[in-house]
Image (cartoon, grey):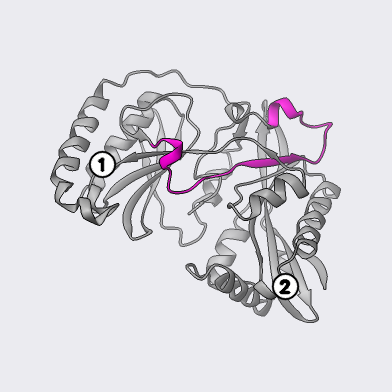
Amino acid sequence: MTVIYKKTTELSDAEIQNICDVFSEVFPEHSRSVASFKNEFLNTDFGYSFHGLLMDGEKIVGSQSYIPFVYLIDGSEKEAGLSVDTMIMKEYRNFDNIYDLLSKGHKLLKESGFSFVFGFPNDNAYPLLTKGLREKDIGDLSTYILPYKIGSIKEKLKSFNFISKIFSAAVIKFSLFSGNTETKEYRIQKNRTKFNDYRYKWFDGNYKKVNKKDFEFFYKIKKHQGVETAFLIDVHPLNKKNFDEAVRDVYQLEKKNFDIILYIGHLHFTPMSLIKIPKKNEPKTFHFTAKILDSKSITPEVLYDVNNWDVNLSNYDLL
């Protein structure tokens, strides 16, 4: 078994198709085309991403990708690698293969001048990253919901949809009293001079942007686990007033097209328009980890504190 790393621009369409086939086998509930692969990994600050290939002879049996970003750390540009799509076919899945795939990726990024690597690992990858590769747990992201049609979440509650609709309408109206415009200056921020131009070309590119007088926001309507979901992706500048207004706009614009509204991220305030799901009731845990590659360019107290991050689904679609 060997591990090689290539840039997206160095991969042939046949190699990309091979990676997509592995993806479909490892994650049978999902699929990926060559076109969607290119949409995601070519639309970056660098114009490409890095891909680790676990090879059995000429056959790709596993893959790991890193999407390069330029993040602003206290206003200074730093290169960061987002770890995504760790996948190995079942018959090749062992500690040594996974470790080789990931550790060689860290080494490549470090040698290429990257300051840190970060990611949102699933429950299977999380122990390996935090124990085997010594990535630090920054903190789980939170899930916020407006349960417009409660019966879409649990079929046996379908008869209570009229109650959840009345409740949601009341929450939306109550959020009109949200007036706090205090905007936090996060120490770790996306470099928005380029970020929005390429980020919303990823996957199917089916994102909607709304420009308001004082802010902008992005959202996406998608069927998720059988539920028509309006995902509020990002609000900028982020404060309580802007956030609640964005939720109200999605509610008014898309009321006929969704069952629930969801936001996944870390907020420095309590919104009036959405309800935070208690940790024990969350349907999925959204882990958030990182590792410093260049200790001279960033310190642990900055990188490993979730309160320093402006983080949500815009950083990566975790769906």
Which mark is nearer the camera, 1 or 2? 2
The vertical placement of 147 against 50, above or below, is above
Name the side, left or right, on which 308 lies relative to 100: left
Please tell me which of labels 1 and 2 falls first in the chain: 2
Name the residue beneath numbered marker 2: 92
Name the side, left or right, on which 118 lies relative to 237: right
Can residue 289 be found in the magenta stretch? Answer: yes
Q: Residue at x 20, y 29 (%)?
A: 173
Front position in the image: 39 or 92:
92
Name the residue beneath numbered marker 1: 251
Query: Label 2 is placed on what type of residue?
Result: Tyr
Q: Where is residue 119 in the image (x, y as percent from the top left)?
A: 64, 47
Q: Distance between the residues labelled 1 and 2?
A: 46 Å
Q: Is residue 268 visible?
A: yes
Dot 1 crowding, Cα within 10 Å, few <14, some 14–19, many 20+: many
The vertical placement of 66 against 309, above or below, is below
Query: Label 1 is placed on what type of residue?
Result: Tyr
Q: Where is residue 172 in the image (x, y as percent from the top left)?
A: 24, 32
Q: Where is residue 3 in the image (x, y as percent from the top left)?
A: 81, 67
